[in-house]
């Protein structure tokens, strides 16, 4: 039960962090949609007026456009999450992109039908809607939804790219850690067995060098055990390890190896 509760807390924290990552975008997105709604309605009002004297401005028109932007954006986000589009699990990014783009005119059509049939909007000014209202309403909402849709699709794609980069970075980090552990385990039992043979021969021939060899061997394995799970070690410790390692090699192979150290303090 405790493990389950702790896992749920971790998942909730991860979800909260993921939500917080999207907050700045949605703040900017909402502001851009609101600004576009006002600019778009200003442009339409200027075209319809023809002159500054007959210019008319409806206060609620941009707000309706903004409301439809929020609805259209919400529908695209729902479709993206429902069908897992433009995600790391996507089999075809091009297919997901086409699906989301195809939803834009469909959303515009549904919103236009809602405006005409439910709210009773007429672009022709007549009491009853005509074909002109359907066409103009659809084109009007299509432009709004194209702006909203491509804003969201671009954000979905950039999020996918960033997630993929982060995943690759983590994979490279794991790979580097595995390679480091592999290198740390290079000093395998065969190395120990060979050095014990060298030590055995030194004990018979030169006890003084045998003691030095044993001391270097002990320091080498002490270092390996000490840094087995360490991610970072000092350069000095690593160089001391390298010197001990090379001493064992030179003692074993004598003149077959020759190393020149050029390292400043």
Image (cartoon, grey):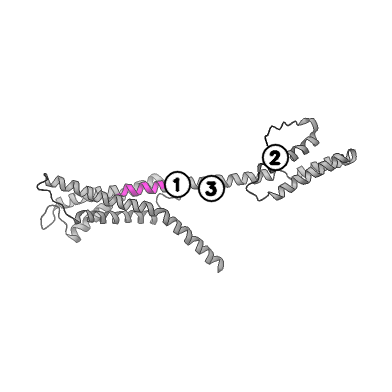
Task: For the residues labelled 2 and 1, say whether their Cβ atoms are less than 8 Å apart.
Answer: no
Relative side of 14 to 115, left or right:
right
Q: Could you tell me what secondary structure mostly forms the magenta stretch? A: helix
Q: How far apart are marks 2 and 3 (CA)?
A: 29 Å
- Of all residues, the one furthest to the bottom in this rendering is 1
Label 3 crowding class (10 Å Cα cut-off): few <14, some 14-19, many 20+?
A: few
Relative side of 229 to 220, left or right:
left
Q: Which of marks 2 and 3 is nearer the N terminus?
A: 3
Label 2 crowding class (10 Å Cα cut-off): few <14, some 14-19, many 20+?
A: few
Q: How far apart are marks 1 and 3 (CA)?
A: 12 Å
Q: Earlier in the sequence, mark 1 or mark 3?
A: 1
SS of the residue under disc 2: helix
At 50% from the left and 48% from the top, the residue drawn is 167
Residue 102: x %, y % from top left: 31, 48
At 19% from the left and 46% from the top, the residue drawn is 43
At 79% from the left and 34% from the top, the residue drawn is 253
Residue 129: x %, y % from top left: 13, 56
Of the pair 193 and 22, the residue shown nearer to us: 22
Classify the position of the N terminus by image quarter: bottom right
Label 1 crowding class (10 Å Cα cut-off): few <14, some 14-19, many 20+?
A: few
Q: Can residue 83 be seen in this view?
A: no
2 or 3: mark nearer the eye: 2
Q: Does the magenta stretch include residue 155?
A: yes
SS of the residue under disc 3: helix
Q: Name the residue under label 1.
A: 162
**Corner quadrant of residue 120:** bottom left
Instruction: Provide the residue span drawn in magenta.
Output: 148-158
SS of the residue under disc 1: helix
- Of all residues, the one furthest to the right in this rendering is 204
Q: Does the magenta stretch include residue 82?
A: no
Q: Which mark is residue 239?
A: 2
Q: Name the residue under label 3.
A: 170
């Amino acid at each position: 039960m405790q493990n389950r509760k702790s896992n749920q807390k971790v998942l909730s924290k991860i979800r909260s962090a993921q939500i917080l990552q999207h907050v700045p975008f949605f703040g900017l997105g909402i502001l851009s949609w609101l600004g576009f709604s006002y600019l778009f309605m200003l442009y339409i009002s200027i075209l319809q007026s023809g002159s500054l004297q007959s210019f008319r401005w409806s206060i609620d028109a941009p707000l309706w456009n903004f409301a439809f932007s929020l609805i259209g954006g919400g529908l695209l986000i729902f479709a993206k999450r429902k069908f897992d589009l433009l995600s790391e699990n996507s089999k075809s990014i091009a297919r997901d992109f086409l699906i989301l783009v195809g939803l834009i005119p469909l959303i515009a059509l549904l919103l236009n039908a809602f405006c005409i049939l439910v709210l009773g909007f007429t672009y022709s000014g007549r009491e009853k809607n005509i074909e002109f209202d359907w066409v103009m309403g659809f084109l009007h909402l299509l432009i709004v939804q194209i702006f909203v849709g491509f804003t969201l699709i671009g954000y979905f794609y950039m999020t996918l790219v960033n997630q993929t980069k982060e995943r690759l970075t983590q994979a490279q980090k794991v790979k580097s850690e595995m390679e480091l552990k592999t290198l740390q385990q290079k000093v395998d039992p065969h190395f120990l067995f060979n050095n014990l043979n060298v030590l055995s021969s030194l004990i018979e021939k030169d006890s003084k060098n045998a003691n030095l060899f044993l001391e270097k061997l002990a320091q080498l394995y002490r270092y390996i055990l000490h840094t087995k799970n360490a991610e970072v070690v000092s350069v000095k410790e690593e160089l001391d390890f390298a010197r001990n390692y090379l001493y064992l090699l030179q003692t074993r192979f004598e003149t077959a190896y020759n190393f020149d150290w050029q390292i400043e303090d």
